[in-house]
Amino acid sequence: MEHAETLEGSNTPLEYQSHQGRLNILGFWIFLGAEIALFSTLFTTYFVLFGATAKGPTPGELFEVKGVLIMTFLLLTSSFTCGLAIHELRRENKKGVLVWMIITLLLGLGFVGYEVNEFIHYVHEGASIPTSAFWSGFFVLAGTHGLHVSIGICWITLILIQISRRGLVPGTATKLFISSLYWHFLDVVWIFIFSGVYLMGMVLK
């Protein structure tokens, strides 16, 4: 029965060709609903604490347009290259998938490295979690996102190792597709952080 389903679905994207694959993708969409709830809570907390700097440094004094734009460029470009990898998945081009996903990971590593450097700079300037309620909310929100990106990098790396060994089969294709959904989700969250945290913070002097 499973074999017949796979043959009938030969024109279906590889990740959807097995019943288990479809269930896994549906389950991951449900998981993303929980992630939305998590980040919604963190954003709400941040906005409630917005401006409560307790005479410490204000975001307007520390946030820099150049740094934020670099991080945004790195992460949004990685979303584009991730999309190209899924395009190659549709073509069942293993080499193309690996190349574009490796580029995606390198861009993600650049983002995480830049964010860590940014956090270190803020701490040296006197802005850390104990400094004030505002900075506590900022570090928890931005740090949680950065942690998710780091987890995504490790996860996708393991998937790429599987693909290099097993090739593009329904099982590996489903994992890659699910990881791409996760990556795009993190990019969307970053857009809200970019606009709601950094851009708004720059006007707070």
Image: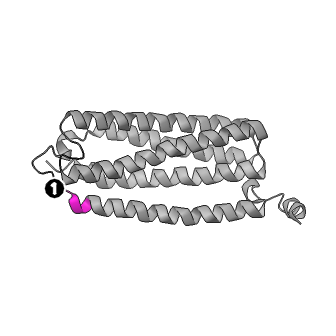
Is residue 21 visible in the rendered structure shown here?
A: yes
Circle 1: element type: loop
Task: Tell me the magenta residue range.
Answer: 47-52
Residue at (60% x, 35% y) in the render? 102
On the rendered image, what quadrant is the N terminus found in?
Answer: bottom right
Residue at (41% x, 45% y) in the render? 146
Seen in the picture, residue 18 relative to 82 is either above or below; the reply is below
Seen in the picture, residue 193 relative to 48 is either above or below; the reply is above
Seen in the picture, residue 203 relative to 81 is either above or below; the reply is below
How busy is the neighbourhood of tag 1: few (under 14 within 10 Å), some, or many (20 plus)?
A: some
Residue matched to label 1:
52
Q: Magenta stretch: residue 49 in it? A: yes
Q: Which of these two is toward me, 55 or 8?
A: 55
Measured as percent of width and height from the top left, residue 31 is found at 54, 63
Measured as percent of width and height from the top left, residue 54 is found at 12, 51
Task: Find the residue positioned furthest to the left.
Answer: 55
Q: Magenta stretch: residue 93 in it? A: no
Residue at (78% x, 60% y) in the render? 18
For badge 1, the amino acid type reads Ala
- Quick check: 36 left or right of 160? left
Looking at the rendering, which quadrant does residue 120 occupy? top left
Q: Which of these two is toward me, 41 or 7?
A: 41
- Quick check: 63 left or right of 184? left
- Quick check: 27 left or right of 17? left
